[in-house]
Amino acid sequence: MAGRARKKTAGESAAPGKVKQPHGGELLTGGVPGNKGGTGRPPDKFKAMCRELASSADVEREVKKILKKGSKDPMFVPALRWATEHGYGKASQAVTLEVGETLEELIVGSMGIRKQAPAE
């Protein structure tokens, strides 16, 4: 009778005990039977990599060039925004512009960069 599966006894299939929680609930000791659980929160290596990428000296130089002369690469700013948001998180407050002030003027002013007049 090698093909027949062995039946579990009551002791083998019984659910694990429960542990009371401060909020009044209960959790199974050892977790849910048959589910080994996950690995927990992943390390912040990805965030650290995004922060390093967004804050590198090369990126800062490129941002200053874009603010002074404009960008030839339409994907640079969205890629920088993506790396910044994933490294540092999204901005928690909205930025309001004064009448007649462009976003570029706001950024240039906050970075202490003087914009050069366009060459004629």
Image: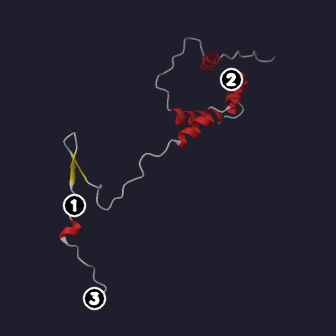
Residue at 54% x, 43% y: name it: 45
Q: Is residue 74 left or right of residue 13?
A: right
The vertical placement of 107 against 72, above or below, is: above
According to the picture, the residue beneath numbered tag 2 turns out to be 67
Residue 1 marker: 3
60 or 71: which is nearer to us?
60
Among the 4 quarters of the image, the one containing residue 75: top right
Identity of the residue furthest to the bottom in this view = 1
Decide which of tag 1 and tag 2 comes sooner along the chain: 1
The vertical placement of 46 against 59, above or below, is: below
Q: Position of residue 12 (x, y in %)?
A: 23, 69
Q: Residues within 10 Å of mark 3 (few under 14, many from 20)?
A: few
Among the 4 quarters of the image, the one containing residue 16: bottom left
Q: Secondary structure at mark 2?
A: helix
According to the picture, the residue beneath numbered tag 1 turns out to be 15
Decide which of tag 3 and tag 2 comes sooner along the chain: 3
Decide which of tag 1 and tag 3 comes sooner along the chain: 3
Q: Position of residue 62 (x, y in %)?
A: 70, 30
Q: Secondary structure at mark 3?
A: loop
